[in-house]
Each structure stands twice: as structure tokens, then as C-alpha cells.
Image (cartoon, rainbow, N blue to C red):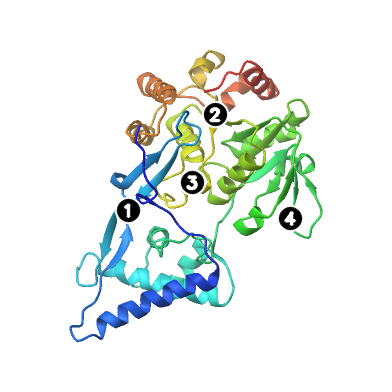
Amino acid sequence: MKFFTDREICYADILPPSEVRARIEVAVLNFLKILTCADPAISDLLLINRKSSNRRVSQGLLTDDDTWIFLSRSFCKRSLIRANAAKAFIRVWKVMEMCFKILLQEKRVTQRELFYKLLCVSPDCFSSQLQVNRTIQALLRCSRFSLGIMASSRGIVAGRLLVQEPDKEMVDCSECGSSGYAISGDLNLLDRLVMKTDARYIIIVEKHAIFQRLAEDRVFNHIPIILITARGYPDIATRFLLHRMSRTFPELPIMALVDWNPAGLAILCTFKFGSIGMGLEAYRYACNVKWLGLRGDDLQLIPEESFVSLKPRDLQIAKSLMSSETLQEKHREELALMVQSGKRAEIEALYFHGYDYLGKYIAKKIVQANYI
């Protein structure tokens, strides 16, 4: 186990708009100062290195409950005089300019909206959403929300949770039907939610269709649970709300119901540890998530015809997970079994036992404490 000091950990600050604008103004003034001095030069931009080689892991002293990914103080350069980095250099300034305008207008935009705006004004610099995302992640060492960029949320909640937004009436998530309560992309609003519950467990559901089935069957009437899904790989808003629930209700275990394949495990790990892409903010979203299912000991419940061969993409994800120092030994054993068998199984395969079987499966797992 390694221990790291605060000097080694690189954080993204949460700042008010005025302070972010001030950081942008200072960056511009410093650039102009060097450009107009007696020995003028175009200064390089130092950005946090987001390669896997700069990934570090912070671990709890006694358990893995507080493990999360972070980035150390390793930097990469964006230079105007290097042909292969010139456009990346310009992109940083273009994004800063746009963020400054957004903050000045007291607006918020999604990453997608920001991309199309930049595409219109600077088509030669931006050709893909990924270029915008990577530039934002490295900008000014402050959170995306501080830059005026709002999370685009796909997440929904159902079950035994009461939520109240500022100046609005309380919403009972058990009465929202199979559509659930939509999680806002406004992290400031999510941070101010008033939440109450009599649940005893929180269940992360990988798939929207499975979430809908459980909500429609009102499984939370029989098991005291809160259901939450990001409909696949988790977005920031869903992770933020889950983290808030874990802090508001620290006595509630959080468990994940995912497909038995490398992608399912990757989704669980993103909720549990965070990601390199959000390494500057991972500690704000990481939660202690247990693996409820599907797991190797559930395969006996699935008919042979329901198994599907692993695809090349599955093997790529498996390889990446195996190289991660965050992966716990029991998770590593499950992943090895997937690769060794060459098969994958989806949660829907449990419908072989009837459409109402999922609720019984979850209840049995919880009662037997059959999770890792």
C-alpha cells in the first residue's frame, strides 16, 4: 500500500464565477507580459498529465472503502511552436475565452452545447467532442461546474426516497412510476436537495430496462431499497447524487447489479473508484460499492443458451481492468473467470425463471449477504 501527501495529489477547486474569471484574466495577463517583455516569447501552457502513467490510488488505512483514483502533479506542455501541439495550444485559449463569456453571462452549458458553439466560431480548431472534453478536463485546475459547464444527466432514481428541491414540494420517488425521478445535471441543485429515506439499501442498476422492470414491479415495497441507474456508464450528475446519498445515509450499503461481463465490472469500478478522465474530482464522486450480481456463482441460474461469447471489445476492457491497481482480488478473480470461459451473461437471462424473479434474486442475495 502506498501513501501520498496532499502535495502529491492534484485537485480541481470548486470556485465561484468571479474567481474563475480572475484565473482566466491572470492567465491572459501572464501570457501578454512574457510576449511583450524585452526578450519576448510565447509561453507554453502547463496542463495536468491525464495519461494512465500519472494515475495514482488513494487507499483507506484499514479497508478499501475509501479508495479512489487521483492524478499526481505531473504536467504536460501545450506549445504553439510545436507543429503537433499548436492546435491543442489554441484550443485551450478558445475554451477559456468561451468559458469566460459563459460565466460573465451567468449561464451554464453542457459539453455538447459548448462543442457546437466552438465548432461554429473556430471550425479549424475543433472537429470532435473529445477535443473539447479533453481541453476542459485540463483547464485551470477547477471543476467543470465552476467553469460554467453543466453535467448532462441520464440518471434516474426510484424507490424509498423523498427528495425536495429548493422552493419546491417534496417528491416521493416510489410514486414516480417506471420513469423514475430524473436526476438534474445542475450539481449546485443536487447539492442542495433535501433527502429522506427509510430504505436499508441502495441498488445501482446498470441497465435502464432492468431499472424499469424493478420499478414497475415496485420491488421496493418488498425490499427497503432505493434504485438508481445511469443507463450504462455513469455520468457525473448520477455519481454526484449517489455520493451525496452515501454521505447523507452512511449506514446504507450500496450494491451494484450489472451484467456479468467486463463492461459491467468497469461500470461498477467507475462508481466505486472514479476515472482517470475525472481524476481531479474523483474524490467527490467515489463511493464504497459492493458487487451484488451478476457474478460467477449465479451462472448456474442461467441456461446455457443465454450465454454469449466475449467480443474483442470485452477483452480490451478486461485487459485494461486487469492492469488497474484499484481492482480488488475478488473482482480480479471474477474477471479472470470471464476471460477464461470466453463467455458473458446479461441480467435479462434471469427472466428464464419468470419476469418477477429479479426481485426474489435481489432479496435472496441481500438476506444471505452474498455480495463482495
Contact (CB < 8 A) between labels 3 and 2?
A: no
Q: Is residue 221 above or below residue 366?
A: below
Q: Secondary structure at mark 4?
A: loop
What percent of the width, then of the height, locates residue 83? Answer: 20, 68
Mark 4 — residue?
165
Measure the alpha-carbon separation of dots 1 and 4: 38 Å
* Mark closer to the observer (4, 3): 3
Residue 73 - label = 1
Of residues 42 and 320, the one nearer the viewer is 42
Contact (CB < 8 A) between labels 1 and 4?
A: no
Measure the alpha-carbon separation of dots 3 and 2: 18 Å
Q: Residue at x 44, y 25 (%)?
A: 331
What percent of the width, then of the height, locates residue 221? Answer: 78, 29
What percent of the width, then of the height, locates residue 168? Answer: 79, 57
What percent of the width, then of the height, locates residue 309? Answer: 41, 25
Disc 4 crowd, CA 10 A, few/some/many (<14, 14-19, 20+): some
- List the single residue furthest toward the right: 169
Of residues 275 and 347, the one nearer the viewer is 275
Residue 283 - label = 3
Q: Secondary structure at mark 3?
A: helix
* Location of residue 55 (image quadrant): top left
Measure the alpha-carbon separation of dots 2 and 1: 31 Å
Residue 189 - label = none
Measure the alpha-carbon separation of dots 3 and 1: 16 Å
Q: Residue at x 40, y 20 (%)?
A: 337
Disc with the residue nearer the chain's start (1 vs 4) = 1
Q: Is residue 122 above or below residue 153?
A: below
* Location of residue 61 (image quadrant): top left
* Mark closer to the observer (3, 2): 3
Amino acid under disc 3: Tyr
